[in-house]
Image (cartoon, helix red, strand yellow):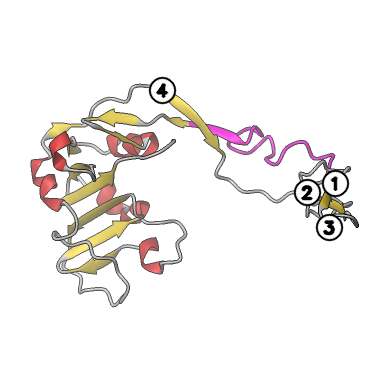
Amino acid sequence: MQAAISFDMAAFCAKEDGWNILTRPWSHGGWMYATDGSWCVRRPTTEPDSQDKQRPDMSEDRLSWYLCQQATEPMPPMDGRTVKIPCPVEYERECCPECGGNNTYKICPECGGGITCRECHGTGLKPDETQTHPDDCQCGGSEEIETPAPQKIGCATFNGARIAWLQAIPGILIRAPKAEDGPDLVLAFVADDGVEGLLAEQRGEA
């Protein structure tokens, strides 16, 4: 079976990043790597080392790849909870004709401060536009989408959407984090084609 994860290593790369190396996989020391800073994967390769001089250090000395050798558990089922997050699709709205989009009607001559625009009430947007996203957007115009809630695995919590993505990989095995692992907890996983991966715990809000 051709593993979905090895077929699409780019799925683990950053979508946009000032550090260009993170937007595509690269090869080093007999491994092909991909990461966006939250999860990282590697698989064996015969390709020569990439010429990117700024590639991050993904060696065994820096990352806990050894945990992948302990990945023998099946991925637990999702708990079914969801949360709402801002829709990732970006749309441009027409600026308010009164303030030009700067949210300020005029400058007070006494204090030098800006007076909130009376036309758009500080939004900077054309007043008759009631929503940013059209009805045919994936959010249906609500500007929010539902996504899997963060999932507790072992002693750590992980991004729900990423866990759902990993769960769809046939035959994936994991190693749940343990308290004795230390402060930087990760979910280690393996898949077909020699793929190894690490997902960092989610900190803060979803």
39 with respect to 178 (left or right)? right
Distance in Å between CA atoms under marks 1 and 3? 15 Å
Q: Which residue is mark 4?
A: 81
Classify 86 as above or below 18. Answer: above
The picture places residue 171, in percent across and down from the top left corner, at 18, 36
Element class at badge 1: loop
Seen at 55% across and 44% down, the residue is 88
Contact (CB < 8 A) between labels 2 and 4?
Answer: no
Element class at badge 4: loop
Mark closer to the observer (4, 3): 3
Distance in Å between CA atoms under marks 2 and 4? 36 Å
Q: Is residue 178 visible?
A: no
Which label number is shown at residue 112?
3
The picture places residue 131, in percent across and down from the top left corner, at 73, 37
| Numbered marks: total | 4
* Quarter occupied by residue 22: bottom left
Q: Earlier in the sequence, mark 4 or mark 3?
A: 4
Span of residues in magenta: 127-146
Q: Is residue 46 visible?
A: yes
Seen at 57% across and 40% down, the residue is 87
Which residue is the extreme one toward the front? 110
Distance in Å between CA atoms under marks 2 and 3? 20 Å
Q: Nearer the viewer, residue 102 or 94?
A: 102
Q: Nearer the viewer, residue 44 or 64?
A: 64
Classify 33 as above or below 190. Answer: below
Which label number is shown at residue 124?
2
Q: Earlier in the sequence, mark 1 or mark 3?
A: 3
**Badge 4, how many Cα within 10 Å: few under 14, some, many 20+?**
few
Distance in Å between CA atoms under marks 1 and 4? 41 Å
The picture places residue 164, in percent across and down from the top left corner, at 34, 34
